[in-house]
Amino acid sequence: MQPVPSTTVAAKPKPRTTRNIPESDKAFSEAFDLAVAEWGQRPQLTLEWTTQPQALALGTQLRESLRTASAADDAITPQTKRLAELDRMIDGSKETGKLKYVKKALALQYDDENDGLPYYGEFGIEKVGSTYTLPRDRAERAEALLKLVKALGLPKHHMADGKYGKAFWQKISDEYNELQPKAAQATGARATEVGGKNQYRDGAQAIFVALLLLVEANYPTTFKAERRKFGVLKESF
């Protein structure tokens, strides 16, 4: 009886793929500019769906959008940084958080009413996860701070005075309510700029990939060297 030949075929190792497109927007923009400039020196290389002058204009749009997005980042950072500092002052660590003193004052004032828990809503305090604090959403937190200041000033609670009374929270509320809308507006502007930047990058990346394939098709034996002239400065980014 003849042995049955094995039909098992050894799996071929998958070829290693190299990524010729820089990940960072700035590095890609620079590589794209090199590719488009080199394309301008080779009019024999054509794409049916776009031209070298169009790609040149797209590269300019991408560079400008990157600068605008960077400027939007610079504008938003100081506001969000200060809001984060105020958040830590409100309900940060044991050392930094001050809202705990309001809850302690409520507990002392209303020790026979579940340590003041029924009054939390009047002070803008709500249950977030397993703890009671001001809302995490900053727009809601700004509104809650207004409620907190108002409640602290009511004579019936006898909590207006003291180190962490109305005057202390009034300052935090005023600053928070001034910064929060500005930060939200800056965030919206940032989202718009990022959306525009992503649109330009997507279009530029499609052209960049097409050019690399075009170079490989036209220079089958020397395409690696030719691609470097098109902005591929190393085999893998």
Image (cartoon, rainbow, N blue to C red):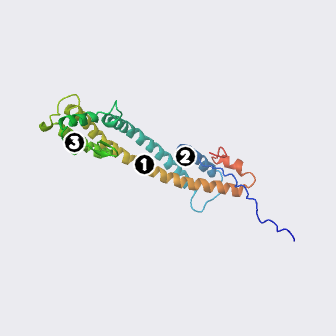
**Placement of the C terminus among the 4 image quadrants:** top right
Q: Disc 3 marks which amino acid?
A: Asn
Question: Residue lying farthest bottom?
Answer: 1
Residue 55: x and y in percent read 55, 53
**Residue to which mark 1 is pinned:** 193
Query: Mark 2 and mark 3: span between their CA atoms?
Result: 62 Å
- Mark 3, mark 1: which one is toward the viewer? 3
Q: Secondary structure at mark 2?
A: helix
Observer-nearest of 81 and 209? 81
Q: Disc 2 marks which amino acid?
A: Ser
Q: Disc 1 marks which amino acid?
A: Glu
Observer-nearest of 99 and 182? 99
- The answer to whether residue 182 shows anywhere in this view is yes
Residue 186: x and y in percent read 36, 44
Residue 101: x and y in percent read 26, 33
Query: Mark 3 and mark 1: span between their CA atoms?
Result: 50 Å
Q: Residues within 10 Å of mark 3 (few under 14, many from 20)?
A: few
Q: Are marks 2 and 3 in contact (CB under 8 Å)?
A: no
Q: Secondary structure at mark 1?
A: helix
**Residue to which mark 3 is pinned:** 114
Q: Are marks 2 and 1 in contact (CB under 8 Å)?
A: no
Query: Mark 2 and mark 1: span between their CA atoms?
Result: 16 Å
